[in-house]
Structure formats: structure tokens, C-alpha cells
């Protein structure tokens, strides 16, 4: 591989060697030719940018979210369902309810019967917090 491709792979470590001399993206499952132009075009795509943004947020906050499938995450701190979009997740983790509840959650104070009931109701209703 040339140096430009190696530089891109260092910046985005979600690629691994795949079959037939292609690079496999672990975030989206796509296979890409190991050429700078093809790799750059794929990295600029909206699907990759969305997956990369969610991945970056989940690196830091994954213990506070549960994957509910269908493009949704359940927040264990606020008991809300959040859309799996980078903007929505970023807004949620920087919001006042999450920031206020995080220290309590770390101490284990939010795992009460009332909070468990709210969480199960939230999952059942599948309310999704979307961008405004």
C-alpha cells in the first residue's frame, strides 16, 4: 500500500485487511479497494460519516447506552431512547439532564424501582429523541 492509504488507515483504524486484497470497514461492513481515491470517496460518504460519528461518541459513553436495534440507543442515565445519529447522540450527552444525571448514575443512585419502571416504559413505547 502506498503512503497516502496508510495515512488514511492510521486516521481511521476501523479498516482491516479483507478478502481479495480489499479493505473491510468494521463499522459498515463495506469492502473498499486499497486505493487513495476509492478510500477517500468512501470516507466522505454519508453512511460512513454517520457510522464514524456514532463510533466516536460510543467510545466515550458506551457504558451508558444500550443498543436497542433499528437505529436506536437507550440511555441508562436519562431513561430516554435516542436516535443513532451523531448529532442526536452528541446533543444528548451534552444536555443538562445527562450531565446532571451522570454523577448520580456513576454512584448507582439511579437504579431504583421508579427508574427501572420508567426505562421499561420507554423501551416499550420506543420513544426516540430526534433533532429539532
Image (cartoon, helix red, strand yellow):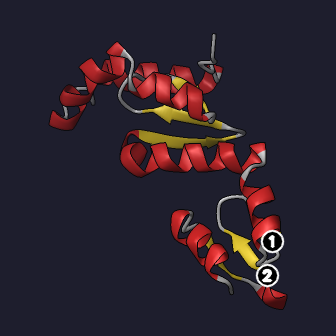
50, 43: nearer the viewer:
43
Residue at coordinates 78% horizontally, 75% vertically from top-left? 35
Q: Which mark is residue 12?
A: none
Is residue 28 shown above or below 129? Answer: below
The N terminus, quarter of image = bottom right
In the rendered image, residue 20, in percent from the top left (x then y), is placed at 84, 89
The reply to whether residue 2 is visible in this rendering is: yes
Q: Which quadrant holds residue 67?
A: top right
Badges 1 and 2: C-beta atoms under 8 Å apart?
A: yes
In the rendered image, residue 110, in percent from the top left (x then y), is placed at 26, 26
Residue at coordinates 53% horizontally, 63% vertically from top-left? 11
In the rendered image, residue 77, in percent from the top left (x then y), is placed at 35, 28
**Residue on which the image places disc 1:** 32
Which residue sits furthest top?
A: 132
**Residue on which the image places disc 2:** 22
- Cα–Cα gap, marks 1 and 2: 6 Å
User: Is 78 left, or right, of 15 in this rendering?
Assistant: left
125, 50: nearer the viewer:
50
**Few, some or many residues within 10 Å of mark 1 (<14, 14–19, 20+):** some
Q: Give the total of numbered labels.
A: 2
**At numbered mark 1, what does the secondary structure look like: helix, strand or loop?**
strand
Amino acid at each position: 500500500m502506498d503512503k497516502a492509504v496508510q495515512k488514511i488507515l492510521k486516521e481511521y483504524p476501523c479498516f482491516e485487511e479483507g478478502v481479495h486484497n480489499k479493505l473491510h470497514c468494521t463499522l459498515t461492513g463495506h469492502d473498499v479497494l486499497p486505493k487513495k481515491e476509492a478510500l477517500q470517496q468512501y470516507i466522505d460518504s454519508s453512511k460512513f460519516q454517520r457510522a464514524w460519528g456514532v463510533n466516536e461518541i460510543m467510545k466515550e459513553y458506551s457504558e451508558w447506552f444500550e443498543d436497542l436495534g433499528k437505529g436506536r440507543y437507550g440511555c441508562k442515565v436519562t431513561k430516554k431512547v435516542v436516535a443513532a445519529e451523531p448529532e442526536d447522540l452528541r446533543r444528548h450527552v451534552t444536555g443538562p439532564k445527562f450531565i446532571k444525571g451522570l454523577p448520580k448514575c456513576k454512584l448507582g443512585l439511579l437504579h431504583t424501582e421508579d427508574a427501572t419502571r420508567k426505562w421499561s416504559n420507554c423501551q416499550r413505547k420506543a420513544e426516540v429523541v430526534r433533532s429539532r
